[in-house]
Amino acid sequence: MNDHFQQLADSLPAMVWICRPDGQADSFNRMWYERTGQTPEEAAGWGWVEALHPDDRNGVWTDWEKAVSGPGNYENKLRYRMTDGTYCWHLVRAQPMFDEDGQVTHWFGISTDIDATHVSQEGSEALTKAVVESAVDAIITIDQRGTIQSFNPAAVRLFGYDAAEAIGRNVKELMPEPYHSQHDRYVHNYVTTGERKIIGIGREVIGRRKDGSTFPMELAVSELEIAGQRIFSGIVRDISDRKRLESELRGHTEVLECLARGDSLESVLTTLVTFAERARPGTLGCVMLLDRESGTLRHGATVGLDDAYSKAIDGVAIGSSVGSCGTAAFTGQRVVVDDIQTSELWEDYRDLATRANLRACWSEPIVSSTGDVLGAFAMYCREPCVPEESDLTFATHCANLAGLAIERVQVDLAQRRMVAIVESTDAAVISNSLDNTIETWNRGAEQIYGYSADEAIGQPISILIPEDRREEFQELQGRLQRGEQIDQFETVRVAKDGRRIDVSLTISAIRSPEATTIGYSIIARDVTQRKQTEAALQESQRQLATLVSNLPGAAYRCLNDKDWPTEFISDGCRNLSGYPAEDIMAGSPEWFDLIVPEDREALWDQIQSALVKKQPYQVVYRIRHRDGQPRWMWDHGRGVWDAEGNLLALEGLITDMTELQIAREQLVQSERLATIGQMHTAIAHESRNALQRIQVGVEMLEFEIPEGTEASRDLQKIANAKDALHHLLEELRNYAAPIQLERSPRKLSSVWRSAWTQIDSAHADRDAEVIEQMDGIDPVCDIDAFRMEQVFRNLYENALAAGSDPVRIHIECSTGGFDGAPGVCVSVRDNGPGLSEEQKSRAFEAFFTTKSKGTGLGMAIAKRIIDAHSGTIAAGNCDEGGGAEFRIMLPLEGTDP
């Protein structure tokens, strides 16, 4: 029994069975098993005979053989053993079922319990009626003229006629053409000839409802004889759902076959739409694909939809109110519009739909296996309509098929791209099994290792591993088994010809859909050339580093900015500036910060002038060393331009030319001294005579000119001018002439005190004071007292000239080491404004002065005197108070406590 017939049989209150002509049973209904107690296995075949009363078995076989030889309808009364072991009488009726050739294929039988004496004939008829009335299939009886005699409720529901309407009509009213016109002839031929066409044979035919609609149905017709009159009974089952499912299954199969053949996406989707329109007559299918980058829907496939409409919606942006497809793709939810003319979702597209004669549309989003929206599948109708649940389910199935097709094409495209990449790459791409057998081998592997694919595939991966790397390979295997990925691991492999090759390996697990490791993917890049290049580059860099480190200065690269940001400077900068290269490149400090402010503008102008002409530059400037001393730099470099002529940086070499500059200055100074000496020698005698005559004249006039008169004051001016000229000549003589010291042990304190007394006239009317801080010592040095007094006088006079009252000159004295021997340090500081950077750097330079009057030789002479004593003198500022400070270091002769 098929499922539907089994359900019908199970619903009957009698034992129903089907057997073969030889008596072997094929199936029973539920009532048989419940009443006899047999299981399906026990009753099948000849097993049902065990339920017969032993006394009835021979008679049953005799009557059955007669019926089968006829063949004709079978009827008999017999006893069956019930579950409780008792036997009950049953009326057994059976009817043969024929195939198209008129051969009996099966017998259909019903065994009715007649054991109860109270069951009358009327009761039996009521039971039969109840069975017919409750049947889920339509049961119709007709006479030999085709007139309907009975019409059960299932037939009413199926055909749409009331029983009263149907009874008395010719059954051909339930058939469409051509069956309608041919049916009476079929019945007449059978009655007159006995030739079976459908009676006793189940077949699929077309039925027609009262409203004229047609449907496929399964029809089984049997013949009965009641009171000498032929009656034909038909059981009708609506198989529309089964046919629709079969059609959908065929459509699904067509789409899947397209996918299996590797057809294009357009072809697959067109097949899907064609199938959808065939399965749902009166609808128009459409597939739209989502372009993620633009957020628009693009044409996927249509068949019956208007071309102008399809082109118009191609490229529409998705949104929350963009028809059915645009909204479904935007929300990821099904959208059903039963009337486009009234839907808010279609407000902007209503006229377009009207021109295409579209009135309803339901759309299902096409979703990938990962939940991403890929597009939308839509079904249109030309009349307003509400889709049934089966229609929506069908649309979902179609959307799923479309998603499968799109993903398959995407995967196929990705695989094709991957294959193309693998085959075109210079890298070796290899896969091997868990037992390390090579399974795939690309062209890159052939180029690197020398083995062809035929030679390599099936071989162990160990053919590529040198003996001295086997242990390393085992370690890599262990890491892979622990779930690690090997990324850019550099090692050595061996080629077919025995060459050792430097390679970079990336190894990862190949996993099954169940996430089980089934092998490993190996990507190997030949880095032999890179290794050689790196070695050559390292050697070149070593040579360059050696060259740069031995340069007499510092090589650099900086940006052309007024702050001169340094990108690179060699280690020689430590000797130049006292700062390591790392600090300069880190901007702590910038090279610019070391440049003496007075030189910065000129330096910038000179370099920019050279860059404009794209010429090399050579510039000289000063920096402030980390120890505070100025250094002279010679910078020669050039600009670096790119191919478009854009200036990228400045590159050059900086060397220290401080000693050269000092030598130059000393040379100039020597030349000046020689010139002064020659000049002084030439004019000394004449100038001395002239000054003497002026002195004699002044002294004579002093006797003649009364004091306090205007003439007396003019005479004093002449005397002062004569003294100034005499002082200048003496300074020139002292500076130009060699210093000859007349040394003797003297206390330094007596020298600076004497010097202060000698300039008494300069500070007599001022608030000026010398403050001594001896710390309990009074050092004795082997010095020329007269020359040292000259040094202190210059320091006092400068302090008085620089500061305003009150002037406080502090003298501190301490002992310590000096050039590895005992020495004394004398600090002379004032409370004046202090020295500028330029004054500190040029304090002992001949002819340099900041005073409105003066020769600029005083401190130069002082330095010569200190140098002659094998000492040093340095200019600076006080840590506290800000005044100028001069520190004199002299060898120590002895101390006097």
Image (tube, helix red, strand yellow):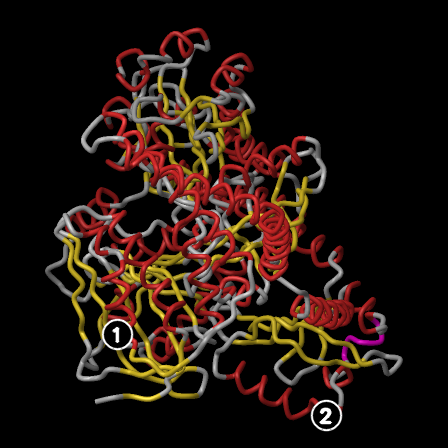
Read off the residue under disc 1.
750
* Range covered by the magenta-colored residues: 454-458
Q: Is 783 placed above or below 403 here?
A: below
Element type at marker 1?
A: helix
Read off the residue under disc 2.
468
Q: Mark 2 and mark 1: span between their CA atoms?
A: 88 Å
Q: Which residue is pictured at 18% across the width and 70% down the height?
A: 772
Q: Nearer the viewer, mark 2 or mark 1?
A: 1
Where does residue 310 sit, x and y in percent of width and height? 51, 18
In this view, the residue in front, 26 or 564, is: 564
In this view, the residue in front, 490 or 485, is: 490
Element type at marker 2?
A: helix
Q: Which residue is pictured at 67% across the width and 83% down the height?
A: 436
Q: Is 857 placed above or below 146 here?
A: below
Image quadrant occupied by the N terminus: bottom left
Query: How many numbered tags mark residues here?
Result: 2
Q: Is 515 placed above or below 98 here?
A: below
> Residue 669, which numbered label?
none
* Sequence order check, earlier mark of 2 and 1: 2
In magenta segment, residue 739: no
- Tag 1: residue type? Ser
In this view, the residue in front, 403 or 260, is: 403
In magenta segment, residue 455: yes
Is residue 241 something that shows in the picture?
no
